[in-house]
Amino acid sequence: DQQVKQNSPSLSVQEGRISILNCDYTNSMFDYFLWYKKYPAEGPTFLISISSIKDKNEDGRFTVFLNKSAKHLSLHIVPSQPGDSAVYFCAASEGTYKYIFGTGTRLKVLA
Amino acid sequence: DTAVSQTPKYLVTQMGNDKSIKCEQNLGHDTMYWYKQDSKKFLKIMFSYNNKELIINETVPNRFSPKSPDKAHLNLHINSLELGDSAVYFCASSQSVKQETQYFGPGTRLLVL
């Protein structure tokens, strides 16, 4: 049973526009959420996090939104840049103890 | 300076062989992890060690045995390799077991023929 789902395997966005990556989860006990970015042949790198006490967290061009009632989080990248082209994983945990990862969304930013 | 390193990067081997993957972190972290990313791109945790002690052991065959000689190293030994073991294996570390941010190694691509 997949507790963390990223239903869009890929997304293409024009440079300068907004990229929105979505993630849904089923376990209402999850209270920490992370986004990781992964380039080919490299390990995932941490991007941004949010805890369930917040509904928004910003870091530069990256903003994560959490909708607890819908069990949904999204990552917004504004403006998108070609260097943002990568696979983005969301991950969720109960108490930061063990993270469950989604299957990733491949973002392609077109110049 | 590489924070989390894994060797080898690529591993091609025959079914039935025994192989090891090494992981080292130079971040001074207490907690280390092994993840498996299969052909469907699921990234699943296999093991976690905190200060050389096993704290997470997911449903993984006994053929997989992690070994942590010190808190900077977490090696993964796999006995009697099977075709289904083909995957990318990622090592990761975090400051503590309750630290949300994990730092990943570059991955080891294992292909079992």
Image (cartoon, helix red, strand yellow):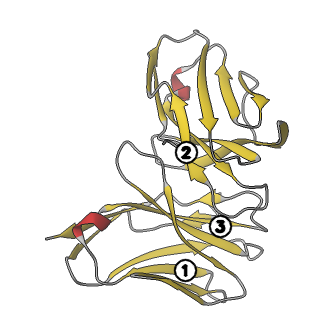
**Number of on-image labels:** 3
- Image point 56% across, 42% down: which residue? B4
Q: Quadrant of the N terminus of chain A?
A: bottom right
Give how far apart the Cα atoms at labels 2 and 1 are: 29 Å
Q: Given the current orientation, which residue lies at the most extreme front position?
A: B1
Chain letter of mark 3 equals A
How far from the left and from the top, in percent, is residue A50? 62, 78
What amino acid type should be assigned to the residue bearing mark 2? Ala
A42, B87: nearer the viewer: A42
Label 3: how many residues lie within 10 Å, few (<14), some (14-19) or many (20+)? Answer: many
Extreme residue toward the left, this view: A111
Label 3 or label 2, whichever lies nearer to me, is 2
Q: What label does residue A73 carry, if any? A: 1
What residue is pinned by disc 3?
Answer: A92
- In the picture, the quarter occupied by the C terminus of chain A is bottom left
Disc 1 and disc 3 on one polypeptide chain: yes
Give neighbour class at mark 1: few <14, some 14-19, many 20+ (Cα, 10 Å).
many
- A9 up-or-down from B32: above or below: below
Q: Amino acid at mark 3?
A: Ala
Distance of mark 1 from mark 3, alpha carbons? 10 Å
Q: Amino acid at mark 1?
A: Leu
Marking on residue B3: 2
Q: What residue is at 28 percent from the left and 77 percent from the top? A: A80
| Apparent side of residue B89 relative to residue A22 in the rendered image (left or right) | right
The percent position of residue B94, horizontal first and vertical second, equals 68, 53
Q: At 63% from the left edge and 72% from the top edge, which residue is drawn?
A: A33
| SS assignment at label 1 | strand
Question: Which quadrant of the figure has residue B95?
Answer: bottom right
Question: Could you say whether the residue bearing mark 2 is in a helix, strand or loop?
Answer: loop
Q: Residue at x 73, y 57 (%)?
A: A98
